Image: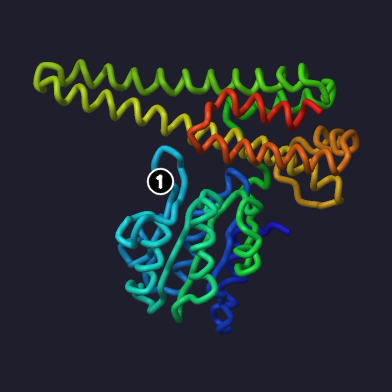
Amino acid sequence: MPFKTDHALSLLTRAQKLGRLGHAYMITGPRGTDLEGFAASVLALVSPARHRLLDDWAQEGAVILRPQSKSRRITIGDDASEVGTIRYLERMIHRTTGPGGFKLGIIVDAERMNAQAQNAFLKTLEEPPSRTLLLLLTAHPGQLLTTIISRVIEIPLMPPSGARTFDEYEKKLLTVLEQLTTRATGSISAALGLKADFQSIMDDLHEEIKKEHEEEFEKEQDHYKQTTDGTWLKQREEEVTAQIEAAYLQRRDALMDLLLAWMGDIARQQVGAEHLDLVQYRDATAQLAKRWSPEDTSKRVRYLRQLDQHLHTNVNPGLALEVAFIQAFGR
């Protein structure tokens, strides 16, 4: 059962005072939950330092990993000197100690560890240095290896309002998903129609992001064109292109996460679970929970998770979407 953040922190505070604080926690919660802010508060339990922002803890010796590069993945790394990788964390967690005497390691968006990174991280979980505190932050714990989940203590959090909030494009996707309650499924044409709706949302999103960044770039050009040479302009063009792609991939990932949360709620209702990620859409997911068999739901979730993984490789995104939607909704 998810906790309100203040209650969850009070439980950890009590455990720390009793000398029962664990060495590894998985902090989970849907979008809108301040996982990083909560993690910063947890670190303050074992250190005299006080920082509200998680990244500020790096100056106290905390090792903070986030998804890297275009693929937004956390990798094992070629060697221990490669910052932002699991091998880097393993090296630094043995070398760096915070002001409270604890070694602190935090993995943000932990589900973004690839399989190799997750297996490597298991070694740290199984044999951590003494006085170590590891925090895994994730909105999708189901994407982590069961061997990792079994070695951490989960702290599920509620968002402040008790319900998720959505941006314009997420609302569009939720409208499409609500229509599944009245649309036919189980045919290739229906699956391709659903895929077309999803693709349209992503295309509109990409266009908006591109427009925003290019408008800012035009302002920079007007300001600097009289004082800089062509080299600066070319470099900025490349930077803007990379920024557009990175912003789009992050927002696309959020849409995929929302799609998986919707399907997850259907599965939860089929087994009578009380907690749902999308409480505002309880009635719609309940209808689909009755309409689909648990086996069908499991199959759909499996194919959509595979799609999420494939979208972080070099496959053609349009083709990957088409194949996955046919597999998930066309049979």
100 in relation to 224, above or below: below
Residue at 78% across / 23% down in the picture? 179
Q: Residue at 65% of width from left, 41% of height from top?
A: 305
**Image quarter in which the C terminus is found:** top right
Residue 54 seen: no
Q: Position of residue 76 (x, y in %)?
A: 43, 56
Asked if residue 145 is positioned above or below residue 211 in the image, the reply reads: below
Q: Would residue 81 appear left or right of 139 to someone viewing this image?
A: left
Of residue 258 and residue 42, the one placed in the foreground of this image is 258
Most foreground residue, 71 or 30: 71
| Image x and y of residue 65, in percent | 42, 55
In-image side of 60 versus 223 (left or right): right
Q: Residue at x 40, y 46 (%)?
A: 68
Label tally: 1
Q: Residues within 10 Å of mark 1 (few under 14, many from 20)?
A: some
- The residue that appears at 11% across and 22% down in the rendered structure is 228
Q: Quarter of the image holding residue 255? A: top right
The color scheme shown is rainbow
- Residue 324, by quadrant, is top right
SS for tag 1?
loop
Residue 44 visible to the viewer: yes
Residue designated by label 1 = 68
Q: Three-letter amino acid code at disc 1?
A: Gln
* 327 lies above or below 8: above
Snapshot quadrant of residue 57:
bottom left
Residue 257 is situated, as x and y percent measured from the top left of the image, at 61, 39
Farthest bottom residue? 18
Quadrant containing the N terminus in the rendered view: bottom right
Is 265 left or right of 123, judged from the image as shown?
right
